[in-house]
Amino acid sequence: MAEPITITGPAAKPRRTPSRLRNLFAERQVLFGGSFILLLVVIAIFAPFIAPKDPLEQDLMLGSLPPAWLDGAEPGYYLGTDDLGRDVLSRLIYGSRIALLVAIVSASLAALIGTILGLLAGWYGGWADRIISRIVDIWMAFPPVLLSILLVAVFGSGVHSVIAAIVIIDWTRFCRVVRAETLAQSQLDYVTAARTAGFPRMKILTREIFPNIVPILIALVSLEMGIAVVVEAILSFVGLSVSSDTPTWGGMIAQGRQLIHHAWWLLVAPLAVLFTTVLAFNQLGSGLRRALDPVLRR
Amino acid sequence: MIAVSILNRLIVAAVTLLGVAVIVFVLLRVVPGDPIAMMIAPGASPADIAALRARYGLDLSLPAQFGVWLQSVLMGDFGTSISLRRDVLELLLGRLPATLELAFAALIVALAVGGAVAVAGTLVRRTPLEPAIDAINGVLLAVPDFVWALALVLFVGVFIPVFPLSGRIDPTLSIDFLTPFYLLESLVRFRLGVFFDVAAHIVMPVLALALPLATVITRILKEALLEAMVQDYVLLARLKGMSEMRLVLQEALRNAVGPALSLTGVQFTFLVGGTVIVERIFAYPGIGNMAIDAVINRDLPLIQGLVLVFGAIFIVINLAVDLLAAALNPRLRHG
Amino acid sequence: MMTLSRRQALSLGTATFLTGVFSGRNALFAQDSSTLTIAYNVNLPSFDPTVGPSAVNPTIQAIYRSIFDQFIGQGPDLSFLPGLLTAWGWNDDKTQIWMDVREGVKWHDGSDFTPEDIIWSLERAAKQETGNPIQFVWSTAGNYKIDGKRITGDVKQYDPTFFKWMAFLTGYVMPKAYYEKVGAEGFEKKPVGTGPYMVDAYEGNAFLRLKANPNYYGGKPAFDTVVFKFVPDATTRVAEIESGSSDITLEIPYEEYDRLKGKAGLKGVATPISDIGMIFLNNIDAMLDKNVRLAAHHAIDKKAIVDRLLRGYGVPIDTLEAPEYDAYDASIKVGYDQAKAKDLLKASGYSTDRPVKFKIQTTRGFKPKDYEMIQAIVGMWRRVGIEAEIEVYEIAKHYELRAADQLAPAAFYNWGNAIGDPTTSTGFAMFGPSPHSVWNTEDLDNMIMPLWGEKDEKKRIDGWKAVSKYIAEQGYVIPLLQYVQPIVYKEKLKVVPNVSGALQPTLVSKA
């Protein structure tokens, strides 16, 4: 998968003392990312009340209208219309529903699977670790774009296929980080103490270690959501995502690309939204990571 | 001990590749539908269809098909492509060099650009320029490779038509290449005219692949450099009166390269994966472009071969990164 | 000091590199005018024009027709012309066929073309194990004999379209001696034909370079060199022609066609081709209700789709026969009538509040605006009380589902028919036992059955017209439009558009 983000695992060495400037920057990142995502969630939930038009309503007589500030615009179509005469702004607003659905569901599922396997591998070690790590290695050897194209070709196109493809490919990200983190935590004093005190292993894992992994997990999930939004766009771009006339950003990009010289707003508007959303998820993720890191690292 | 560890890693790589083979096979055989439907003519009888199926070995049971397939793959026989009607291995070997050249050229450009920006960012740390570089890089991090490709086609391609937009070499040139490595071969044989033509063709896809990776490298490396700059040995060198530039380039970079490298390795596999779409857009004749055709045509033998090759590349990259990291990092070498 | 000089050396190296790269680019622009560079929309998979799936891919026939000759030629208006056969026909009772073979033709390798080659090609095509997808036609004649330049053969089963296929898919003449010498693999590496151009260099997914055949029987072609660049991405094709890297391109979005043809130095031509867009209906679920089928047809405003979405590039049709086809009947009309569609649905108990629901499958980006068209149609259906769910699939998937008769109740497809015969359009598309049909009911099959071997041509064509009329009345299929193919080229060229859609280099010349 086109992977614009890095996940620094716990293998990283102790970081230098965070300066105040850096903390501020981190907070600003969280502030920007968080508030944009929050805004997006609100827009998605209240789409029917916010959208000026029905995103599916077509009028071939009103095709390819320019945005409101250009000549030839029709009142009420703030960002113009596509070649079928559908309102671009309304489609963008409704498109946020699919984008967030894909982002939230696929990132959570990938996190769930990856975390469970990562915890098991990191905590129990031995055979469990060897088998799970081997599977992860095999998995990482697949070309992500090709694999997702293949998977969607196998399952047929649709939101569920896109989500399935992301989960199937990206759970390994979580698994690797969580495994390494669990391994690191299990060598710390508090775990040794808990073990000497005779707590059951499972209980130590769920009560003691897991809560310490949650912060980095949250950051990872946020980054993964950004990735999911991009993947949905890539799959739409090669024509394999959601296929009904339900608006999606990726679908709008693919459509706008064909008409770039004729109606540039059809490409620029969804690209801008996609880009800002990915940026927001990235910023939120890396901001959270920076903010939460010192706690984690002690 | 190092030899043992290398051998160990090789065995692991082989096992991984076998795992890839099993998964590819299972995945493609559960594809609902019928891979030979494309070949059925209007008016073909059920008997014709059965004969076609038998010809491609699709009438056997699944495990039997896998056995037959694995055996022939081990013998170097990847089967015949249904859509291209040629030997799959021959096709792959013919196309792979194009993708390798593209990927490595992109890696080099990404390392150069990403490295330069990271060093620059380190040099200007704690000045107003640093957050500016961070912010721009952070923004560019959010641009996926297909968007870079699109932007390049639309802006560089049409408005500043400097570089060719499609293909790997000017089709009107008649050149007898000895190997499928056009870029490398023309350079080694010092045929500069040819080399420049091939280089001009590769510029656009290389940029589309390199720029996203460069942003990632910038970020990883800069973080590592900043960390290194506050370590004792750097402080010591500074006390000795070493210039800031040399501090960054000689002391910090040497120590930051190791950790940055392993993450770059993972990122490089994403770059290789990205060739699928970028090659398509720039009509570049590599295995990525072929892969999309193969999926569209449901060409099972070719898809299997392609995924195996991609898998092998990924495994080799990971192996190389592991070994390099071990070689560069004394701590790992002993541990 | 040291660092500085190193940096200087480095920048010097970069400068040399860039100058070199730019000059490499200049070499590109300085192409001599005797080279024709075509930015082509599909990759050429295989050189053998008679075997495998690529043989029946209409899009690459332009390439095959450059390298090979067909038994019978075809003009850009679909008329049949002498090819490697100069005359042909049946005897009176249609039990025998005869063909006259052109003399003095040479293969690209310099050897003589003989009647043996014709017979070998026909017999090879008729053999099942060769893998010719049209084998079922070629096997209807055999037992060929040579008498001078005339070949005669026995008709095993009369097929009125036999000679038409000789100018259509897989109807190519292959070199007997050469093929037997080098085999299938060798032929893929170095194909030999009799066509106007010879293969010079080929790189899959990149380009095919052809050079003029100086011995071509139709005279030396207009260009010394023809390059097909395989550029599947439409945006890149547009950039290719706009930046001047290619001389001619095709199948670009109509918006881009309109923009580019107005640009200085570029010209455009857009002609209706023998390729139609249609919606297959499957005899399952909601489609068993005649009211629903007819309402779905009446609800579609084809003219609005053509005018607004396709910018006028398309011809609305009501049967599977386009105006250029033999069995076209202008009197068969279905017509856009929203009120009627609503009434029909009401009679079956459906309305906009209680819509009839079904799934419609479509390709996306396979044909210009295919997906957009289906979205527009679904929008029109929504207004009368049809709620259709769109599913996108690859074209290969369509073939799979169609062969297994598992298509959704409605499925969009495009049907090419470059010989204009009703059997190769309405026939294969609608006759139940054909593996390519979707609607299978006995009433229709019984009507079509006698037409396959009808020896009286007028009766045959009239019969097919009656079939088209019946299909329209029953609503067994929804024909949408005949496609228009956009071609953009440099103004220094002259292009004769081909109704079959094959952009053959021989139809391009210097202006």
Image (tube, rainbow, N blue to C red):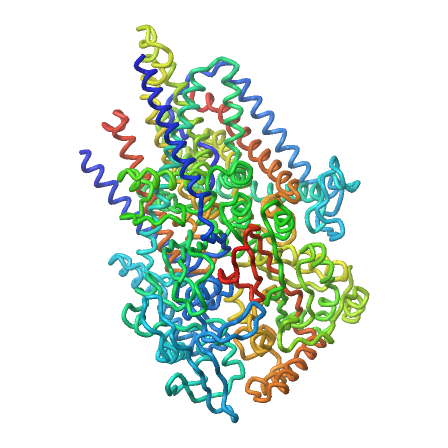
Q: Quadrant of residue A194?
A: top left
Picture layout, residue C382 above or below residue B174: below
Picture layout, residue A232 above or below residue B72: above
Of C220 and C158, nearer the camera is: C220
Determine the residue located farthest toward the bottom in the rendered image: C93
Q: Is residue A186 left or right of residue A242?
A: left
Q: Position of residue A288 (x, y in %)?
A: 52, 27
Q: Quadrant of residue C371?
A: bottom right
Q: Position of residue C61 (x, y in %)?
A: 48, 65
Picture layout, residue B333 above or below residue A48: above
Give the position of the C terminus of chain C as an image quadrant. Answer: bottom right
Regarding residue A201, the answer to whether it shows in the image is no
Of B225 and C276, nearer the camera is: C276
For the point 38% across and 73% down, which residue is it? Answer: C105
Q: Position of residue C188 (x, y in %)?
A: 34, 63
Give the position of the N terminus of chain C as an image quadrant. Answer: top left
Q: Is residue C16 left or right of residue C271?
A: left
For the point 24% across and 43% down, which residue is it? Answer: B10
Of A264 and C106, nearer the camera is: C106
Q: Is residue A24 left or right of residue A202?
A: right
Q: Position of residue C434 (x, y in %)?
A: 53, 77
How many numbered tags mark residues here? Answer: 0
Picture layout, residue C39 above or below residue A27: below
For the point 75% across and 62% down, which residue is it? Answer: C385
Of C298 and A288, nearer the camera is: C298
For the point 59% across and 35% down, which residue is it? Answer: A277
Regarding residue C330, the answer to whether it shows in the image is yes
